[in-house]
Every structure is written in C-alpha cells, then in structure tokens.
C-alpha cells in the first residue's frame, strides 16, 4: 500500500488505515442505511470478508486510505480514500463518516479539506475530483466550501429512493501543470 501520510485537521486527524481500525463498528457503519444512504454501498450487506477485500485493495498501487480519528481520543469515526489515475494525473476523493451522532458536526468538511489540500499540493497531480448524488446537499456543500467547482453532471444516472437522481462531479486543480 502506498503510505498515506498523517494529516492534522484541527480536532481530527487523517491517519493511515491500519488493522486497529478494522473493527466491528467499521463493518456496522457499512450496514447502516443512514450512513450509506447516498452511497452505492447501500445496495449490499457487508461482512468482515467484504470489508477486508476493500482494505486489501489498497495494498498495491498508489491509492490511499485514511482513518479519520478524533485527536483527543483517537476514536475512529470514518474514512477517506484517494484513488489515482496516474496516466492523467488525477486523484478522486471519497469519504464516509460512520460514527453515530457525528455526521453534521463539521468533521467531514475538515477531513475532506485536509485530504484535498494534501492532494492538490502534490507535484504529481494536476486535478483532484469528487462526486456525489445531487440530493446529497451536505456533500455538495462540503465540496463547494473547500473550493471545488462543479465540472460535470450525469443526469438521472442512479435510482435514489425510487426516483432517478443525477450524479454531480466537482474538481479542483492541483499544483502540477507541466506547461498545460
């Protein structure tokens, strides 16, 4: 696995996902309909094997997986991932706040901003992207507050709560431009 660096984000930190983060709580987040409401993970049940497969997928290649921890207690409250398209010098961020009662507290924005700032400063990346279902107003707000701009829309791409929902794409240009 490419080693994700520790990133301090005020009251939280992003730290490389490790065996200690692989808990029953983590697995239960992925089976909680409220946690995965806007995620394509909502279509399946997860167990230790499926979660392990996801974590192991980061063992080879450049992709990064962070655990989001509260600094004061080291409590694991969610995850941030960055998947890389090396040929096009792009990274795509994903996030999950799983701990009960902590969604809507600002921790998601801090974690997203920390990962985004780290990635946009990398010399090997020219663009960082993220996306979400259009009804996910909280995620749209996070991406906009972090300086990302909407750069695409796939109309009526998913079925969400019985209706067609669009997929929105956001991006922020990185440090690397190499004469572009």
Image (cartoon, grey):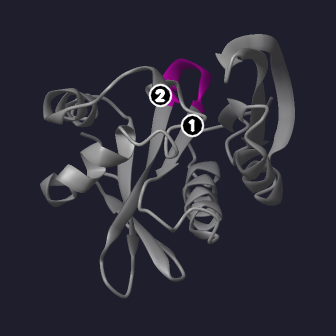
Of marks 1 and 2, which one's residue comes earlier in the chain?
1
Q: Which residues lie in the magenta part?
A: 84-90
Q: Residue at x 61, y 34 (%)?
A: 38
Q: Residues within 10 Å of mark 2 (few under 14, many from 20)?
A: some
Q: Nearer the viewer, residue 151 or 117?
A: 151
The percent coordinates of residue 124 (x first, y second) are 55, 39
The percent coordinates of residue 43 (x first, y second) are 45, 20
Question: Where does label 1 land, which residue?
Answer: 37
What mark, if any, has residue 42 been given in the picture? 2
**Count of labels in the image:** 2
Picture quarter containing residue 30?
A: top left
Tell me if 81 is positioned left or right of 157 in this view.
left
* Residue 2 magenta-highlighted: no
Tell me if 47 is positioned left or right of 8 in this view.
left
Tell me if 114 is positioned left or right of 97 in this view.
right
Q: Residue furthest front?
A: 162
Instruction: Check the picture and name the quadrant holding the N terminus.
Output: top left
Instruction: Check the picture and name the quadrant holding the C terminus.
Output: top right
Q: Residue at x 37, y 21 (%)?
A: 44
Q: For mark 1, give the secondary structure.
A: loop
The percent coordinates of residue 114 (x first, y second) are 57, 63
């Amino acid at each position: 696995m490419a080693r994700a660096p520790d990133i301090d984000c005020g009251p939280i930190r992003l730290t490389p996902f490790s065996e200690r983060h692989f808990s029953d709580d983590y697995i239960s987040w992925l089976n909680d309909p409220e946690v995965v409401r806007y995620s394509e993970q909502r279509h399946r049940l997860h167990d230790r094997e499926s979660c392990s497969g996801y974590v192991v997928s980061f063992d080879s290649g450049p992709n990064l997986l962070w655990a989001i921890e509260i600094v004061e207690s080291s409590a694991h409250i969610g995850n941030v991932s960055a998947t890389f398209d090396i040929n096009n010098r792009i990274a795509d961020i994903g996030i999950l706040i799983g701990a009960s009662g902590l969604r809507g507290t600002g921790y998601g924005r801090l974690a997203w901003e920390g990962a985004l700032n780290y990635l946009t400063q990398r010399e090997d990346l020219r663009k960082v992207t993220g996306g979400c279902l259009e009804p996910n107003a909280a995620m749209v707000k996070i991406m906009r507050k972090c300086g990302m701009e909407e750069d695409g829309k796939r109309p009526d791409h998913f079925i969400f709560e019985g209706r067609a929902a669009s997929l929105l794409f956001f991006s922020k240009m990185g440090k690397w431009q190499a004469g572009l």
